[in-house]
Image (cartoon, rainbow, N blue to C red):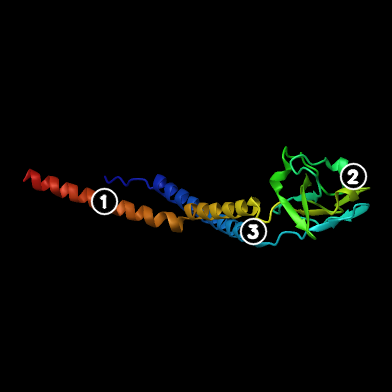
Amino acid sequence: MRITPTRGPRRRRLRDSAASRRRRQVAGIALLLLGASVLAFGIVAGRADPPSPVPVEPDGRTAVPTTSFYQSPWVLYGRVDDPRRPPSIEEVGCRAVGGLQLPTQPDDPSTYGSRVVDDVPISAVALLGRSGQDAALACSAAGTYGPLWLMPASEARPFTATGIAIVGALLLVAAALTHPSTTEPPRRWWQAWVRRRTGRSRLADLDADR
């Protein structure tokens, strides 16, 4: 009587392996598309020009252009006696309205540097974050500190854009590590190398026994 071994467990393993490979293919393609999109967006954001400086009306309301989350925040510059101890934005006579943010002020606004407008040196007075819709700066009797200007915090590219590009590159690496087409060939090469080494070791043992 001949007993034929069952192939049920082996077939189940093959089916599970095929399903796992399909899932890895889908995940790898999804990560590839997402990573390429994020990387492209980060590169475009890093090359975007900073917003143009905005002259501020000392008596009136000045509209502030909308900025994106990856752009540098606004800084209010004006003429002050001591750049390290500038007056507060309220003392200057201005206030942020609408979609203009007013974050916690730094201890030393002079870290944002100074500018020269029409041969007049102006220094950082207040940090005014990023601006959304209907953002404006309303001032009253602020001519003493004029000329007043809103300028980007730095001409350097913001780290946010660089961070977006880094995330995109990491997603591409994750896609390469997930997709079977990039992980299976090295594994086959490694297995073949191990088999060759194991075969050589066995031949060496047989020769030694002889």
Task: Tell me the SS state at disc 3.
Answer: helix
Are the two marked residues, 1 and 2, in contact with CB atoms closer than 8 angstroms? no
Callout 1 amino acid: Arg
Q: Which badge, 3 or 1, is on the more N-terminal residue?
A: 3
User: Where in the figure is residue 30, as x and y percent of width and height?
Assistant: 58, 56
Q: Between 49 and 173, which is closer to the camera in this rendering?
A: 49
Could you tell me if residue 156 is visible in this image?
yes
Circle number at residue 5: none
Q: Residue at x 47, y 52 (%)?
A: 177
Q: Determine the CA span between mark 2 and mark 3.
A: 35 Å
Q: Which badge, 1 or 2, is on the more N-terminal residue?
A: 2
Q: Determine the CA span between mark 3 and mark 1.
A: 49 Å
Q: Determine the CA span between mark 1 and mark 2.
A: 80 Å
Callout 3 amino acid: Gly
Callout 2 amino acid: Gly
Q: Which residue is mark 1?
A: 195
Q: Which residue is mark 3?
A: 46
Q: Which residue is mark 2?
A: 93
Mark 2 vs mark 3: give the one in front: 2
Assign the N terminus to one quadrant of the image. Answer: top left
